[in-house]
Image (spheres, rainbow, N blue to C red):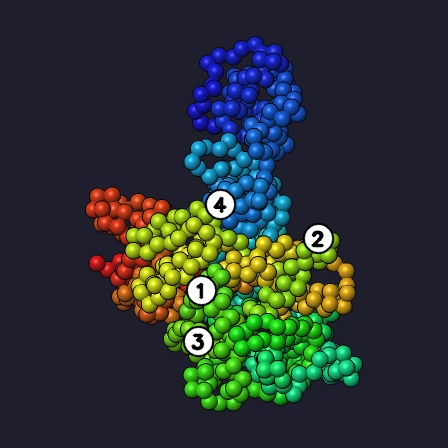
Amino acid sequence: MGKNKYKRKKPANFNKKTLANSILGIFSNNPKNTFNYKQIAKYLLIKNSAEKKLITQVLAELAQSNDLEEIFPGKFKLKSSVGHVIGKVEIAQGGYAFVSSESISDDIFISQKNLNHALNDDIVKVYLFAKKKGRNPEGEVIEIIERVKDTFVGIIEVSPDFAFLAPDSRQMPFDIFIPLDKLNGAQDGQKAIAKITGWPRKVKNPFGEIVEILGEPGEHETEMHAILSEYGLPFKFSEDIEVDAEKIQVKITPEDYNSRRDFRDIPTFTIDPENAKDFDDALSIQKLPNGNWEAGIHIADVAHYVKPKTPLDQEAFARGTSVYLVDRVVPMLPEKLSNNVCSLRPNEEKLCFSAVFELDNNANIINEWFGRTVINSNRRFTYEEAQQIIDTGKGDLSNEILKLNQLAHIFRNERFKKGSIDFEREEVKFDIDDKGRPRGIYFIEHGESNELIEEFMLLANRRVAMLFGEVVEKKDKKTFVYRIHDRPNPEKLEKFSLFIKKFGHSLNLSSNIKISESLNKLLSDVKGKNIQDMVETLALRTMAKAEYSTNNIGHYGLAFKFYTHFTSPIRRYPDIMVHRLLADYLAGGQSKNAKKYNRKCRHSSDMEQRAEDAERASIKYKQVEFMTDKIGKHFEGIISGVAEWGIYVEINENKCEGLVPIRELLDDFYEYDEDNYCINGRHTKKKYQLGDPAKVEILRTNLPKRQLDFAVVE
């Protein structure tokens, strides 16, 4: 219990009123603590059973009058003025956590001892302590409303009497106790998946059982499956789902032809990465008799084949998205659909859902049409092949590609004039051998051919969203799925603006359009400089996360008032939802249940985040693997992150990022300056700041944890 201001020197005689005042005094002086009647009796030096019984009565009455709160049976705490909030847990590296809640603006700090078995991403009920000025609110988890994850990947450690699974994830701070009869064949040192089966309140470690053995740590297949499992993502389809996919009728019927607009004789093509197998979008263009241009954006009609409430649809919804790891795609739909039936392969008739626009030479939209079509793609281009045509003016369908590129330039320029932000970061790719080992790292930059496709996809997404978003009469509004992006966090933006002034740059924060203009200028000015990655990373951190919602607030980053995802139904479930809603509403259907669709939107946003996290984890794993034979070598880099436990350095030549632990900086005692993104030596005044160049030596590589440790080379 420790020392307390309210400890009494000698017992006193209490009546109910004086006892209530004394008890409230104890709780007021200890707003974070919980007490039962025995602890109160000890504080008040009460030993006789009658007065102890009175304490129990008074505690119950104080709870009934809302002065106290019964957190657990028999345990009480001072009632917070804010009370309880519901939120989502985010475990930090130090084992403590923050809970984000829509009820209050600031994240709630939760110490490790007050987590009460809550884990990362759990939905919890938090009791708020009295807020201290200038600090995040603090609280204690008193109920786990939803355990989001109960399976964890890790290494099995077997001893004669019991075993543990040591989780790979830093966000799972507890080893899982595994009884020997629950190992299910797992051997010491193997990587496996454990499921939590129980966690008694006063026990530190959860109990579990092994549900799947992944294999030996360090093996390529083991680690890729481990990453997918860590984020709750599947790596194969069940046999039943594959059988259902094989049963799908692929032949186009006379009814299909008669009910669709025919684009088979209009020049049509796809442009995709060289290794792509699923082509879910195609472009067509033809000159009209009046001199205008008809441009078609044709999207695979996945909804024609994947019907609502079928096992295939339920599987696609559960996955939410395709997952792109360094060496593979884990598709949302079985291969029969994703790479065959729905893929817009050249010289094959395909069913599509299309957005068709009549455009003049200045890319003004004269007319538009949305509906189901049938196409026959004339040619499949890679981005490199299309780029060569743009650069030389020669090649298959060169007139069509050049015209679309000219129109795309106009769309792009207009978009940036209206405040769209130009975030274009290099893609990290690996040259991987037949055993999955990385032989090299290279980077992909987008060219005009990428921008051509991007602009026409943005056009289709924007105009589809406008169909139902621009209805003025509230009674005519229909539930729809939007892709939304909120405005930047003002405090983060202000902090970022002050920081970049140290590098001679500035932001104009006077209006949304000025923010966008100055941000684009900043991103352009730092391109190719050693602070580019740092500036882009910090700029992205000021931004909100794009997500799906039925509540349209616009898309800040693109400067679109209305935006959706219509163009990738092979790999994104929200696009299937949009196709279904669009088809139904165009046929005169009634508005759908907004709550139901918003739940689907939240799930889709969550699965998108998981897929992105898994992709980053696979990149990080391959980067660490690539550096395992480079221990002791020196590299030039840039400080890419600063935290209280050290500095992160990204190597210039391969973008591999590692940590210089603060404990390795032996020349001084370093203190973390969060506002200025740096650590400062207390005696030497040496500073390590975000964006500074740094030369490092590779100290250690930890493949299972996907960690690189560096040392600074003076």
Which is more N-terminal, label 1 or label 4?
A: 4
Q: Nearer the viewer, residue 590 or 246?
A: 590
Residue 238 at x, y = what percent? 66, 70
Residue 240 at x, y = what percent? 71, 72
Q: Measured along the vertical axis of the image, is residue 326 above or below residue 201?
A: below
Label at residue 447:
3
Q: Measured along the vertical axis of the image, is residue 333 above or below residue 475?
A: below
Q: Residue furthest bottom?
A: 395
Disc number lying in front (4 or 1):
1
Query: What residue did someone put label 4 on?
Result: 97
Query: What residue did someone put label 1 on?
Result: 422
- The Cα atoms of the two marked residues, 2 and 4, are separated by 42 Å
**Seen in the image, is 622 located left or right of residue 39?**
left
Which is more N-terminal, label 4 or label 2?
A: 4
Residue occupying image coordinates x 20% and y 46%: 684
- The Cα atoms of the two marked residues, 3 and 2, are separated by 42 Å
Label at residue 474:
2
- Disc 3 marks a residue whose amino acid type is Gly
